[in-house]
Structure formats: structure tokens, C-alpha cells
């Protein structure tokens, strides 16, 4: 039986399903798409096909629902694009947020499953990994693009290929042209695809899994976009006032080229050198716990240091014309009760960007954790039991 809440919005849900599945060539695909969507929204702890079918009453055709999501030949990109078009005016996004999440698996039959680290479990375990792109603003967010990460063991062209694993590709319906691509490159591909739909958002936000990769930051900049990305404490940089110099020519061999006289420092060292007294208090939003905020909730508050630095590294050198590394923002959170900074971000936002804007942009990434929690706990994101590549993306 439908819950009262779902019954009250049944017409709206059917209109939404009709909009999302309008590109489908066949009426039965459109029908079962709407039924599947309704099944995901029904009350019930598990949202895999069999328990959903039991809750859907006369529409509870388990075989038809399983066929729709696992093997029916429809293009998931068409639905993702329509979802993005639908959500853009609702969310009014100020940023594209990138992250990945794990899907824990007991066996090895599902597409792209392997032992790998996932924050979902906080350890290396047997799982799939999915990279997602979310439209986000302070008030709302939604995942509108996804990629299933294919590990090297599943790619016959990879030096890490595993013969037994590669042999499962056909059974999992993995297209022959799909190979191993790093997660940061999948993220850039999703940014390109989302922009091809006419969704233009000027900022990209990601955690250290992406920010630590200079190629990802360079790729975002090459697309004319701003970024605020997490980085690890070991990321290296030169101070803003550091200047390369050219050593004297000895008269032998190639002439020396300009270089920085001092080695690059870890970003944590740069912030500690600036001193705890340089940290400034910033409130970035109101949380969910009761408090003294205007809405009755506790304010999210901490202290932050912002420095102008020159990120270093071989990839930065290759991508930079001239001898000087470009200047970027280093943002660090340094709570009053901590002896050292606890979190770090890099950003290419303009030099005139105020500290509160840097902080609020960096902290907007919390929206993606909210999205994952809602999708996994309420909408069955982690309950899909199909084993195919198209089934996962559907």
C-alpha cells in the first residue's frame, strides 16, 4: 500500500517520471521507469527489486522491474541530462561538487568489484567505487552524473590486469572500449559532459582524493573554472614572495635555467610558520543541532588561516609557462583548541576573495555527504543487486 505522503504527490511523481523518461523509445520502458521510481520512494527498509515488487501491489512485477534496470537498452546519459535540467532552476547551483563512494560487495561477480579503499567502510575491502558529480548551493544539492570506476585488474590493457577478472567482463556487459581511467579523470569527463548539457557552473569543489592530484587542478583551470579542493598536509609549495634565480654559468655544459633557491615546503609548515595568531574566526552556516542561531540551530564556527602561496611539483612546472609557479590560495582550519592546523584546501579564486567566501565555498562540500546519506538510507542506492555495467549506471 502506498504511504499517505506518496499518495499525496502521486501526480507530481508521475509528471516527473514522464519528464525523465520521455526520450525512451518504448512505452513499456517509460511505464516501468515510473514504477521503479515509485518503488524507490515507498516505505520499506530495503529497495532492491524483490522487496520493492512486494510493496508495489498490482505493479509489482519483479521480472519486469529487474529487466528495466539491469538489461533494458536505454541510455542513462539521457536521464542524467534531464535530471540536471530539472534540478538546475530548483537548486540554483553555485558549485559542482565531486566525490566518490563505495558499494560493499560480498562476492566478486559484480562489475568492477575489487579490494580497494573506500571511505564508506574506512578501510580496504571488497567493493565497487562510484564517482559522482553534484549540483550544489547552500540550500540544496543533487547528484546528476555518475561513473563506475573500473580498476586496473578489470582492464586487459592494464599492467595490473587479472586474467580471471578480465574474463568476467562479458558476463558483466562491460563495453569493450571501457578501460581503466583514474577517478580524477572520470571527474573531469563528467564536468565536460555536464557542461555539454548546457549546465554552466563556475566553481568545482572536491576533497583531497582529487585536490592532491595536480593534473586534476590543472584540468579544472584549463576549462576556465575556479576550484576549492582539499589537499593533504604533505602537499608542497613555495611562499608567495619566493623568486626563482639563475645560477651563474660555469662555462661548461648547458646554461642553467631559473630555479627556486630553496626547496618547496609542506603546506602545514607554511601555515605553522604564519602562526596561530594569524587565524581568524569564521561562521559558515547553521547546523542541525539546536543552538542560538537565528533559525534556532547551532552555528558552524571555527578559525582559519588564508595564505597566498605557489603550489610546487613536476606537473605544475610542466604546465606553467615561464619560471614562476602561479600564486594560489592556501586555506587552513586551525581551531582554537588545537596545537596545529587540522585541514587544508587549495583554491584559484581571485586574490581579492574574502576569507569568509573561501571558507564557505570549501565547506559547501558537506552537501555531498548529505546526498550520499539520503540516497543510501532512504532511496536504496546501496541496495541494487544487479551485476552488470549498464545495470549499475541505470
Image: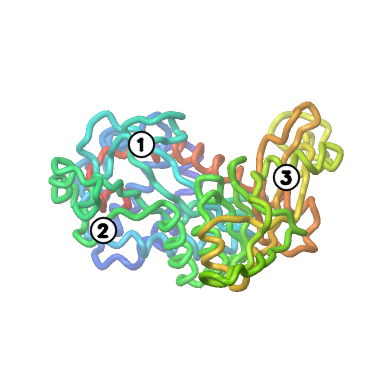
Q: Does dot 3 land on a helix, a strand or a loop?
A: helix
Cα–Cα span, label 3 and label 2: 42 Å
In the rendered image, which residue does mark 1 sit on?
Answer: 116
Q: Which residue is mark 3?
A: 270
Q: Earlier in the sequence, mark 1 or mark 3?
A: 1
Which quadrant of the figure has residue 45? top left
Left or right position of 284 against 250: right
Indicate which label's residue lies in the foreground, 3 or 2: 3
Nearer the observer, disc 1 or disc 3?
Answer: 3
The disc label shown at residue 203, or none: none
Whether label 3 touches label 2, CB < 8 Å: no
Disc 2 marks which residue?
178
Q: Is residue 228 above or below residue 124?
A: below
322 sits left or right of 299 in the view: left
Q: State the scheme by which the image is colored.
A: rainbow
Image location of residue 321, percent across then percent down: 59, 73
Q: Earlier in the sequence, mark 3 or mark 2?
A: 2
Residue 224 falls left or right of residue 274 = left
**Mark 2 vs mark 1, CA separation in Å:** 19 Å
Q: Who is closer to the viewer here, 107 or 42?
A: 107
Rendered-image quadrant of the N terminus = top left
Q: Secondary structure at mark 1?
A: strand
51 to the left or right of 199: left
Residue density around tag 3, few if under 14, some if 14–19, many if 20 or more, within 10 Å: some
Mark 2 nearby-residue class (10 Å; few <14, some 14–19, many ≥20) = few
Is residue 142 something one can see in this rendering? no
Question: What percent of the width, then of the height, locates residue 328?
Answer: 69, 59
Q: Position of residue 69 (x, y in %)?
A: 27, 49
Residue nearest the viewer, comparing 190 with 376? 190
Amino acid at each position: 500500500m502506498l504511504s499517505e505522503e506518496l499518495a499525496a504527490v502521486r501526480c507530481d511523481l508521475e509528471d516527473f517520471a514522464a519528464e525523465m523518461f520521455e526520450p525512451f523509445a518504448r512505452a513499456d520502458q517509460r511505464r516501468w521507469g515510473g514504477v521503479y521510481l515509485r518503488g524507490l520512494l515507498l516505505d520499506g527498509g530495503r529497495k532492491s527489486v524483490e522487496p520493492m515488487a512486494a510493496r508495489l501491489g498490482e505493479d509489482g512485477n519483479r521480472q519486469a522491474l529487474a529487466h528495466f534496470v539491469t538489461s533494458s537498452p536505454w541510455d542513462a546519459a539521457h536521464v542524467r541530462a534531464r535530471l540536471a535540467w530539472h534540478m538546475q532552476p530548483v537548486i540554483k547551483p553555485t558549485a559542482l561538487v565531486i566525490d566518490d563512494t563505495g558499494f560493499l560487495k560480498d562476492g566478486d561477480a559484480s562489475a568492477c568489484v575489487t579490494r580497494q579503499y573506500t571511505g564508506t567502510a574506512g578501510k580496504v575491502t571488497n567493493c565497487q567505487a562510484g564517482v559522482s558529480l553534484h549540483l550544489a548551493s547552500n540550500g540544496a544539492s543533487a547528484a546528476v552524473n555518475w561513473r563506475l570506476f573500473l580498476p586496473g585488474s578489470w582492464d586487459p590493457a592494464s599492467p595490473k590486469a587479472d586474467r580471471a577478472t578480465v574474463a568476467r567482463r562479458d558476463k558483466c556487459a562491460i563495453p569493450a572500449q571501457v578501460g581503466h581511467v583514474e577517478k580524477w579523470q572520470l571527474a573531469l569527463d563528467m564536468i565536460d559532459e555536464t557542461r555539454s548539457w548546457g549546465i554552466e557552473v563556475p566553481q568545482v569543489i572536491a576533497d583531497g582524493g582529487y585536490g592532491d592530484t595536480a593534473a586534476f587542478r590543472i584540468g579544472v583551470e584549463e576549462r576556465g573554472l575556479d576550484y576549492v579542493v582539499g589537499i593533504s598536509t604533505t602537499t608542497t609549495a613555495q611562499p608567495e614572495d619566493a623568486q626563482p634565480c639563475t645560477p651563474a654559468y660555469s662555462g661548461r655544459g648547458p646554461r642553467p635555467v631559473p630555479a627556486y633557491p630553496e626547496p618547496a615546503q609542506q603546506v602545514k609548515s607554511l601555515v605553522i610558520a604564519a602562526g596561530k595568531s594569524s587565524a581568524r574566526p569564521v561562521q559558515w552556516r547553521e547546523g542541525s543541532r539546536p543552538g542560538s542561531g537565528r533559525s534556532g540551530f547551532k552555528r558552524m564556527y571555527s578559525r582559519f588561516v588564508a595564505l597566498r602561496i605557489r603550489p610546487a611539483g613536476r606537473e605544475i612546472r610542466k604546465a606553467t609557462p615561464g619560471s614562476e609557479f602561479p600564486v594560489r590560495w592556501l586555506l587552513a582550519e586551525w581551531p582554537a583548541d588545537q596545537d596545529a592546523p587540522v585541514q587544508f584546501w587549495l583554491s584559484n579564486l581571485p586574490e581579492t576573495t574574502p576569507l569568509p567566501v573561501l571558507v564557505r565555498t570549501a565547506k559547501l562540500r558537506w552537501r555531498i555527504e548529505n546526498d550520499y546519506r539520503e540516497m543510501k538510507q532512504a532511496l536504496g542506492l546501496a541496495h541494487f543487486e544487479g551485476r552488470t555495467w549498464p545495470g549499475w549506471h541505470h
